[in-house]
C-alpha cells in the first residue's frame, strides 16, 4: 500500500527547532519559532489565560462534542474582537476552527467548491504554511511583490501594479497586521488602495489575522480589515488566537465569510462546517472556552489586554535597542527599517548560506529567508547578535 510513497519535504521550522534544542553552546540565540518567551527562555503563559483555565477546571469542564460549527458564542465574541466591535456592511458568518491554519484551510476548501479555477495570490514572502495549505486544497497560487530586497521596505509599485491586473477568479491573501515574516507595515492609505482595487477589479480579499494587538493595539490593528469590509461585497477572514492569547498548542481559531445577503452567509457557514467536519469532525473546545471566559469576565479581559500591551511594548523596545546597536556597530542607519515594522518578526538582509553560517559558527538560529523572531531576543543577546550578523552579512562590503 505505502511502498511507493515519496518522502515529503522537511519542515524548515520544525527541523531548526530540533537542531537548536540539541545545540548546547552557552551563547546560543534561537529566533526561529514565533513564540513569546520570558528571560528564562520559557514560552509565556499569560496570567488571564491561567486564571481562566483554573476557573474552568474548578467549575468542571464539559468535554462533550460541541458541533461542527463549534461554539458559536465564542465565534461571535472573536468576530467582535477581529472587527473592533464595529458594524460593517453586509452579513458575517463564521465557524470555530482548529487554529488560524484550520480556518485558512476551511476557507480554501470553500473557495475550491465555489470556483475550482480560482487562483490564490500570496505575498513574496509569506507565512511558511500558506503555500502548502493552498496546494493541499488543490488550488493554484502565484506571488505578488511585497518586500524590496535591497531596502527591506515595502515594494509599493510591485504590489499595486500586480493587484490592479487581477479579476474575479483571483483571491488575494493579506496579513491583517504584523506581516509574517517581514514585519512590513501597511498604512491606512495602502489598505484603502487595496480596498478600492478589490472593489473595482472584483478580486476576493482573504485576510489572515494572527497578530492582532502586536502593532498599535487591538482595535487599531483591525483598521485594514474594517477598511476593506466597508468597501467590498465579499471577503474571507481567518483568525488565530495562538499569539495574542499565547494558546499556541490549543489550536484556537475561526473562519468567517462576509456576504451581501443573509442567505449567502448562512450557506457559506454551513459549507465551512460540513467540510471541516470531514477533516477533524469537531474543533477542540478547551482553548476556545478559555478565550470565551476571558471575553465574558471583565476582570480577566482587562488583565489579558494589559498583559498583551506589556508584551507588545517589550517587543517594540527590543526593536529600538536592536536598531541602536546596528547603528553603533555598523556606522550607518541601514537597519533602521526594523523600526518601521510591526509585530514579532523582522528579516535580516541575509542569504540562506549566510543564515547557515550564523547557525553553524555563531549559534544564531533564524530561518533561511532571514526571518528572526524579535519576541525571543533577550536584551543581553543584542550586542552579540548584531556583531555576528554584521560579520556575516557585510563580509564583502
Image: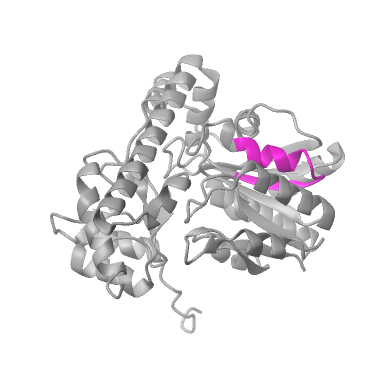
Instruction: Residue at 30% x, 46% y: name it.
Output: 324
Across and down, in percent, residue 203 comes to 77, 57
Q: Residue furthest top?
A: 299
Judging depth in this view, the residue of 345 and 294 nearest the camera is 345
Count of marks overlaid on the render: 0
Give residue 296's position: percent from left, percent from top: 55, 19
Q: Visible in this render: residue 154? A: yes
Q: 163 and 4: which one is in front?
A: 163
Quarter of the view holding residue 266? top right
Q: Residue at x 85, y 41 (%)?
A: 260
Residue drawn at the location 54% of the way across and 23% of the way down: 295
What segment is highlighted magenta in the picture?
Answer: 222-238
| Vertical order, 366 against 327 (above or below) | below
Seen at 79% across and 46% down, the residue is 234
Q: Quadrant of residue 220?
A: top right
- Determine if residue 19 is in view: no
Quadrant into which the C terminus falls: bottom left
Outermost bottom residue: 4
Is residue 114 placed above or below 185 in the rendered structure? below
The answer to which of 143 and 260 lies nearer the viewer is: 143
Measuring from the top left, give residue 111's x and y in whole percent. 73, 58
**Left or right of residue 291, residue 112 in this image:** right
Residue 62 is a magenta residue: no
The front one of 152 and 385 is 152
> 172 above or below 229?
below
Amino acid at each position: 500500500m505505502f511502498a511507493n510513497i515519496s518522502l515529503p519535504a522537511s519542515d524548515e521550522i520544525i527541523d531548526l527547532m530540533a537542531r537548536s534544542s540539541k545545540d548546547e553552546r552557552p551563547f546560543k540565540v534561537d529566533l526561529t519559532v514565533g513564540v513569546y518567551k520570558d528571560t528564562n527562555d520559557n514560552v509565556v503563559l499569560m496570567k488571564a489565560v491561567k486564571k481562566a483555565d483554573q476557573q474552568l477546571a474548578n467549575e468542571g469542564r464539559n468535554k462533550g462534542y460541541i458541533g461542527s460549527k463549534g461554539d458559536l458564542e465564542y465565534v461571535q465574541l472573536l468576530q467582535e474582537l477581529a472587527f473592533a466591535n464595529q458594524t460593517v456592511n453586509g452579513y458575517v458568518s463564521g465557524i470555530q476552527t482548529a487554529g488560524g491554519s484550520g480556518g485558512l484551510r476551511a476557507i480554501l476548501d470553500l473557495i475550491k467548491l465555489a470556483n475550482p479555477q480560482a487562483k490564490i495570490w500570496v505575498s513574496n514572502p509569506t507565512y511558511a504554511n500558506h503555500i502548502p495549505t493552498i496546494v493541499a486544497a488543490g488550488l493554484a497560487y502565484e506571488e505578488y511583490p511585497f518586500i524590496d530586497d535591497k531596502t527591506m521596505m515595502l515594494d509599493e509599485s510591485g504590489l499595486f501594479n500586480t493587484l490592479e491586473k487581477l479579476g474575479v477568479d483571483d483571491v488575494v491573501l493579506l496579513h491583517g497586521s504584523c506581516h509574517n515574516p517581514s514585519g512590513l507595515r501597511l498604512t491606512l492609505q495602502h489598505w484603502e488602495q487595496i480596498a478600492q482595487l478589490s472593489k473595482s477589479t472584483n478580486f476576493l480579499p482573504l485576510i489572515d489575522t494572527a497578530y492582532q494587538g502586536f502593532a498599535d493595539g487591538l482595535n487599531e490593528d483591525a483598521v485594514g480589515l474594517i477598511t476593506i469590509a466597508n468597501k467590498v461585497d465579499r471577503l474571507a477572514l481567518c483568525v488565530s488566537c495562538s499569539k495574542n492569547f499565547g494558546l499556541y498548542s490549543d489550536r484556537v481559531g475561526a473562519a468567517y465569510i462576509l456576504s451581501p445577503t443573509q442567505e449567502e452567509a448562512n450557506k457559506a457557514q454551513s459549507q465551512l462546517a460540513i467540510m471541516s467536519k470531514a477533516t477533524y469532525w469537531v474543533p477542540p473546545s478547551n482553548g476556545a472556552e478559555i478565550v470565551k471566559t476571558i471575553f465574558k469576565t471583565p476582570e480577566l479581559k482587562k488583565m489579558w489586554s494589559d498583559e498583551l500591551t506589556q508584551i507588545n511594548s517589550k517587543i517594540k523596545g527590543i526593536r529600538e535597542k536592536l536598531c541602536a546597536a546596528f547603528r553603533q556597530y555598523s556606522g550607518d542607519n541601514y537597519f533602521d527599517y526594523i523600526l518601521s515594522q510591526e509585530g514579532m518578526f523582522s528579516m535580516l538582509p541575509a542569504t540562506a548560506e549566510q543564515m547557515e553560517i550564523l547557525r553553524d559558527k555563531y549559534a544564531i538560529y533564524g530561518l533561511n529567508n532571514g526571518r528572526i523572531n524579535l519576541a525571543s531576543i533577550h536584551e543581553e543577546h543584542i550586542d552579540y547578535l548584531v556583531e555576528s550578523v554584521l560579520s556575516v552579512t557585510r563580509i564583502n562590503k
